[in-house]
Image (tube, rainbow, N blue to C red):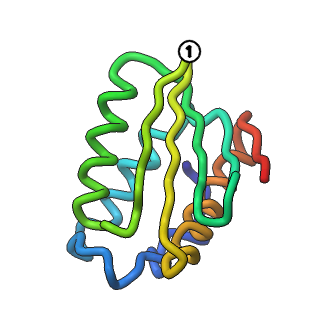
């Protein structure tokens, strides 16, 4: 997700995130690298849930599950559901009401990347 300068400062990361500050930019870069070229659709089916659709490929599901597991370890307010489908992988990201602003920021960041690519955004 290149070209999304509005989220580069990571001010949107809540205090409840236990990932050391110096590692946060690296984690964001990992997400960016995984989603780059793989993200095919983004939707917000509910206010507290974001759905990402990724094109499947070699090791994509394994990488996604690894990243989700590590993210869950430092940001327990996220709930992730990975669901493989034919040639696609769905990733649902949910939060509680107290962290809706974090999900909003994630949606903005991801949505900006989608608009620069070929994926579609829906509400």
The residue under the point 24% across, 52% down is: 70
Question: Residue 114, located in which quarter of the rendered image?
Answer: top right
Q: Is residue 82 left or right of residue 27?
A: right
The x, y position of residue 83, in whole percent, is 47, 31
Relative depth, front residue between 23 and 53: 53
The x, y position of residue 77, in whole percent, is 38, 69
In the rendered view, would you say 83 is above or below 11?
above
Q: Is residue 1 left or right of residue 26?
A: right
Relative depth, front residue between 116 and 98: 98
The residue under the point 47% across, 25% down is: 84
Q: Is residue 62 left or right of residue 94?
A: left
Residue labelled with disc 1: 86
Relative depth, front residue between 108 and 104: 104
Mark 1, other Cα within 10 Å: few <14 / some 14–19 / many ≥20: few
The residue under the point 36% across, 48% down is: 30
Relative depth, front residue between 101 and 7: 101
Mark 1 lies on a secondary structure that is loop
The residue under the point 65% across, 63% down is: 108
The x, y position of residue 8, in whole percent, is 49, 69
The x, y position of residue 65, in whole percent, is 32, 38
């Amino acid at each position: 997700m290149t070209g999304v300068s509005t989220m580069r400062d990571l001010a949107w990361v809540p205090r409840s995130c236990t990932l050391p500050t110096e590692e946060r930019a690296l984690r964001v870069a990992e997400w960016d690298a995984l989603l780059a070229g793989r993200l095919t659709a983004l939707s917000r089916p509910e206010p507290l849930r974001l759905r990402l659709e990724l094109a499947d490929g070699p090791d994509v599901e394994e990488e996604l599950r690894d990243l989700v597991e590590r993210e869950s370890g430092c940001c327990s307010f996220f709930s992730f559901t990975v669901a493989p489908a034919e040639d696609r992988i769905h990733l649902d990201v949910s939060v509680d009401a107290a962290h809706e602003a974090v999900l909003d920021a994630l949606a903005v960041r991801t949505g900006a990347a989608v608009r620069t690519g070929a994926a579609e955004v829906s509400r």
